[in-house]
Image (cartoon, coloured by chain):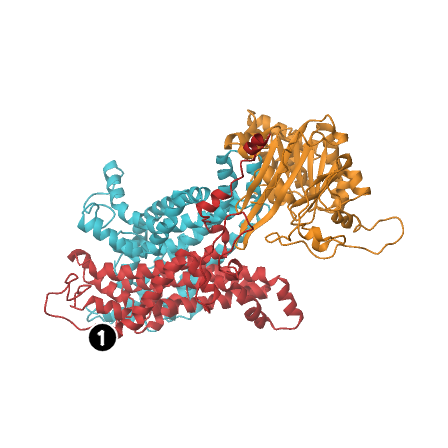
Chain colours: A red, B cyan, C orange
């Protein structure tokens, strides 16, 4: 699907002689996958990818560069110091350096979000595609399940579930959020599978004797990549927000340092009242930044899959050259 | 009418599922909630040999076989008996909920209607005038706004507009100490207190409606009947509203129904940040206080409210789409 | 831009066909060119098309899918959407330049002078409002009728096309394909236009309904006296129905002649190929002869005559020079080096 809208030849294309040249962006380094090229040509998606890449790099490389201990307390000053040369992001109630905490927490924050997204997407593929492909009773039951899970408000449910479980690691959080957020994706994938199922290439595979699941995985799924990817990204945005919410209310895995826990401690130490805005604006801002980056990427995928959403920008010179020639004036002159 | 009866059946099944889920959760969790409760509240019950039995009675923990417990549960539910709250002891859970429910309905109702109407309206105009100023500015702006977790925006607004600048009150639904009444003063006070929390919800939610409507409109505008309507010389306004928007609004309504659950969820955190005394705030506190009867009941009530709202959305959809009516 | 003008040629200097002498000129298309901008470059969907349409005639426009016929219809009614653009030529209706009309003039011009019946009536009607609303919308947009009057007139129009007025309250999805097409025709008649463009009006219908609809159209034409621009890929329909026929290939008109002449004496090799692809019901069995090859890619059309790769009579000049649409005897025009200008 993504490849349909990018030409094989990305170099300059000239229209038949006389018309204004229609230029395309220069080709990317040889070997880059096509989907990446089309994604990068969309400005919104490119910005999103850049931000995401930056954060991932910080997550991996950061702790190697800034090797301090995020849990070390600096008692040289009172707690909750605003950002300064010594502590770029200030300190919190326990005199921890927030910059270090942010850098060291990047990896686990992103990992948490993505693993929840992965779990939910996996479930949505399993349930949605089975319902769409196999039909009949399987479809009835799975659809009912999907619709019920969809209609029950998830955040209150998550809060209640989290309150029952003793959270000592990331696993309960991933499980709770992941097991309640697959429904939307399942519904979308189900309806797309239903459409695909009637297509000729699927019928051909059935006739040649391929088994149900093989057809689903090998024939149908590859045609739905953009749906699955954008579903994964959307679910991850939601997951990050939900995880932040859980931590905020105190149900997170507080043994670990990540952006969500920093936010919790900020709230816990009445940062609002004491005016220590850096303790919550910074981690919250980072969370919002990831959400924005992912949403931008999704926006870009939408625009690529649905060309109508693109706002065509024809260069003004080219557009002017395409107006109908003043034939009447010429003719009047010729007579 | 087949469509509606199918939907009604679905909601009944969903209702049953939520009731049963509500029943199952506490009984599936490890440990005896009565013992957990006693452990944290032992001071109240010191020296009472019947403490465990009393607490078990309050919490509804019993050793009866499960089907019997389920039956009792359903009967109690039918009588509107949701148990006794442990954090507001000896108030009944239903009383506690009855006090917070109106505030939530007010806040959610106000915020979601504003967000939906303005988002949809702006979406229509944005899609109609592609490449205009609105189309360049609004989608990215609202996309940014909707990527903010609800409560983060709530924190920001509370901090900067509430604590720092002191433009708005920082907590509760009305000034503490004033007596609730239907006077203009009190209503004004209520609205004043509702501005920040409502604004938070509107800002985060509007992006979704705007983008959704815009995208649906763009798809609808590509349909043949729009072209034909213009070919027939109808005015722009008529085509935009009766032909384009009237069709594009249908998926929006479905999306609205589905987003309700999400909206209610975000509400919980917003209420918590602003100490707004609605169901969400009560839930957050109840969870913190391990008030399990209240927690379970709140979850049930919130779910029922969302189901009811979904049913209403389905009714509206059926009213607007003639293809569904004759199905 | 590939706009070609024969110097000094205007509608007045183009002789009127004999059988239409004395009739009023309605639509004058001069050297119309339309392009689609795609990622691969500009596709010339319509290239230097000229023809005149007179009052009371049925002008048939025939060709394969993708030859540009529907594009012309959309260009005339100014329904072209990006990435399609008119890049050359003029379209005059009653002397007025259609491309130069401002928004309000265009709105009032539309439907009252030229209306269009398109291919898929399924998608041409708004699914959420009923037929009565469609009729009322159309009438009220152009007249000062009240809602009641408009609905009455709408019911009358439906009766004229053979639909009972109770159907005014039906929704599009409740009608059959044939009925929807009749509704489209009723809508097209609403303001008594001078010209109705019919773009493949019967293609989506089964043969029996096709015949009924065509009969209906003919009766209505007799009754109301409008001209028809009939666009189709089915040449057999045109031969019966039209006054004159224009054959299109790869965005150009390659032959223009009275219907009987096209049927009995096709000149252009493409027309000859088309006519011999019809099996005849009577007469001796003949082996079927199609036209070898496939239509050209309009983003990079062949040099010279666009049909030369598939033409059995191609000469060396055909690969180099694109022939002009030359006037022949009896007002026939052919775009072929076999029939040079006289």
Left or right, residue C310 beside residue B292: right
Label 1 sits on residue: A67
Q: Chain of mark 1?
A: A
- Of residues A82 and A171, which is closer to you in this image? A82
Rendered location of residue A117, percent (x, y)? 40, 66
Q: Secondary structure at mark 1?
A: loop
- Residue B277 visible somewhere in the drawing: yes
- Residue B327 visible somewhere in the drawing: no
Left or right, residue B283 beside residue C319: left
Report which quarter residue C230 is drawn in: top right
Up-down: is B309 above or below A95?
A: above
Rendered location of residue B117, percent (x, y)? 40, 43
Up-down: is C5 above or below A16?
A: above
Residue at horizontal 37 percent and vertical 71 percent from the top = B63
Disc 1: CA contacts within 10 A as few (<14), some (14-19) or many (>=20): few
Rendered location of residue B92, percent (x, y)? 30, 56
Report which quarter residue B118 is drawn in: top left
- Of residues B45 and C95, which is closer to you in this image? C95
């Amino acid at each position: 699907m993504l490849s349909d809208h990018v030409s094989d030849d990305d170099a300059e294309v000239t229209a038949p002689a006389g018309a204004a040249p229609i230029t395309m962006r220069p080709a990317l380094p040889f070997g880059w996958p096509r989907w990446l090229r089309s994604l990068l040509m969309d400005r919104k998606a490119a910005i999103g990818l850049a931000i995401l890449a930056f954060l991932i790099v910080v997550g991996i490389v950061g702790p190697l560069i800034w090797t301090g201990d995020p849990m070390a307390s600096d008692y040289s000053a009172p707690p909750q110091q605003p950002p300064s040369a010594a502590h770029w992001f200030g300190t919190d109630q326990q005199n921890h350096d927030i910059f270090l905490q942010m850098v060291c927490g990047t990896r686990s924050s992103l990992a948490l979000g993505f693993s929840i997204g992965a779990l939910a997407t996996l479930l949505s593929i399993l349930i949605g595609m089975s319902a769409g492909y196999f039909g009949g009773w399987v479809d009835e039951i799975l659809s009912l399940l999907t619709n019920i899970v969809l209609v029950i408000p998830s955040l209150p449910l998550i809060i209640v579930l989290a309150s029952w479980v003793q959270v000592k690691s990331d696993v309960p959080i991933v499980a709770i959020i992941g097991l309640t957020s697959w429904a939307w994706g399942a519904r979308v994938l189900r309806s797309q599978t239903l459409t695909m199922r009637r297509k000729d290439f699927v019928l051909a595979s059935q006739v040649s004797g391929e088994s149900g699941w093989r057809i689903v995985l090998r024939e149908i799924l590859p045609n739905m990549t953009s749906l699955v990817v954008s579903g994964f990204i959307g679910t991850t945005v939601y997951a990050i927000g939900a995880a932040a919410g859980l931590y905020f209310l105190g149900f997170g895995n507080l043994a670990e340092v990540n952006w969500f826990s920093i936010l919790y401690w900020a709230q816990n130490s009445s940062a609002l009242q004491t005016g220590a805005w850096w303790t919550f604006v910074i981690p919250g801002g980072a969370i919002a930044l990831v959400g924005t980056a992912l949403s931008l990427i999704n926006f870009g995928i939408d625009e690529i899959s649905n060309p109508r959403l693109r706002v065509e920008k024809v260069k003004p010179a080219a557009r002017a050259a395409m107006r109908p020639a003043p034939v009447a004036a010429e003719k009047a002159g010729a007579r | 009418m087949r469509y509606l009866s199918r939907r009604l059946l679905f909601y009944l099944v969903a209702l049953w599922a939520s009731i049963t889920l509500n029943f199952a959760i506490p009984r599936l969790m490890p440990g005896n909630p009565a013992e957990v409760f006693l452990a944290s509240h032992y001071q109240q019950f010191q020296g009472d040999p019947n403490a465990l039995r009393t607490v078990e009675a309050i919490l509804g923990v019993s050793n009866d076989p499960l089907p019997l417990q389920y039956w009792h549960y359903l009967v109690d539910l039918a009588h509107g008996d949701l148990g006794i709250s442990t954090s507001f002891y000896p108030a009944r859970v239903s009383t506690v909920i009855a006090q917070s429910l109106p505030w939530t309905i007010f806040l959610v109702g106000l915020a979601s209607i504003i967000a939906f109407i303005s988002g949809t309206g702006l979406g229509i105009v944005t899609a109609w005038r592609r490449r205009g100023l609105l189309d360049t500015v609004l989608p990215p702006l609202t996309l940014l706004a909707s990527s903010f977790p609800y409560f983060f925006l709530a924190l920001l607004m509370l901090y900067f507009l509430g604590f720092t600048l002191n433009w708005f009150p920082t907590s509760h639904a009305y000034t503490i100490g004033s007596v609730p009444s239907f006077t203009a003063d009190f209503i004004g006070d209520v609205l004043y207190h509702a501005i920040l929390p409502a604004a938070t919800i509107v800002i985060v939610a509007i992006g979704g409606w705007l983008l959704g409507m815009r995208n649906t409109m763009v798809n609808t505008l590509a349909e043949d009947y729009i072209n034909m309507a213009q070919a027939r010389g109808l005015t722009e306004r008529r085509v935009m509203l009766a032909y384009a928007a009237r069709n594009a609004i249908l998926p929006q309504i479905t999306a609205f129904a589905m987003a309700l659950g999400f909206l209610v969820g975000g509400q919980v955190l917003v209420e918590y940040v602003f100490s707004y005394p609605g169901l969400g705030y009560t839930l957050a506190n109840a969870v913190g206080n391990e008030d399990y009867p209240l927690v379970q009941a709140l979850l049930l009530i919130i779910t029922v409210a969302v189901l009811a709202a979904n049913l209403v959305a389905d009714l509206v959809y059926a009213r607007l789409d003639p293809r569904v009516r004759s199905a | 831009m590939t706009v070609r003008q024969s110097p000094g040629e205007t509608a007045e200097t183009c002789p009127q066909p004999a059988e239409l002498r004395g009739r009023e000129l309605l639509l004058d298309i001069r050297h119309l060119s339309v392009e689609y901008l795609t990622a691969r470059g500009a596709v010339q969907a319509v290239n230097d098309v000229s023809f005149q349409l007179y009052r009371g005639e049925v002008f048939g426009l025939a060709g394969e899918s993708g030859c540009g016929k529907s594009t012309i219809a959309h260009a005339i009614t100014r329904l072209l959407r990006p990435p399609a653009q008119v890049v050359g030529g003029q379209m005059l209706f009653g002397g007025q330049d259609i491309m130069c009309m401002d928004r309000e003039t265009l709105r009032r011009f539309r439907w009252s002078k030229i209306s269009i019946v398109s291919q898929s009536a399924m998608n041409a009607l708004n699914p959420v409002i009923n037929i009565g609303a469609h009729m009322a919308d159309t009438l009220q947009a152009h007249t000062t009728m009240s809602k009641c009057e408009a609905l009455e007139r709408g019911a009358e129009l439906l009766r004229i096309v053979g639909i009972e007025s109770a159907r005014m309250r039906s929704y599009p999805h409740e009608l059959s394909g044939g009925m929807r097409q009749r509704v489209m025709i009723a809508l097209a008649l609403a303001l008594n236009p001078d010209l109705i463009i019919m773009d493949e009006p019967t293609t989506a219908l089964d043969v029996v309904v096709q015949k009924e609809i065509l009969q209906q159209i003919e009766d209505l034409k007799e009754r109301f006296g409008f001209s028809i621009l009939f666009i189709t890929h089915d040449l057999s329909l045109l031969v019966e129905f039209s006054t004159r026929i224009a054959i299109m290939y790869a965005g150009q008109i390659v032959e223009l002649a009275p219907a009987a002449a096209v049927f009995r004496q096709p000149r252009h090799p493409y027309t000859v190929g088309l006519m011999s692809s019809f099996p005849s019901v009577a007469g001796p069995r003949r082996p079927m002869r199609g036209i070898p090859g496939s239509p050209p890619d309009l983003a990079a059309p062949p040099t010279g005559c666009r049909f030369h790769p598939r033409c059995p009579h191609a000469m060396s000049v055909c690969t180099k020079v694109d022939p002009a649409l030359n006037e022949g005897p009896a007002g026939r025009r052919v775009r072929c080096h076999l029939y040079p200008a006289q």
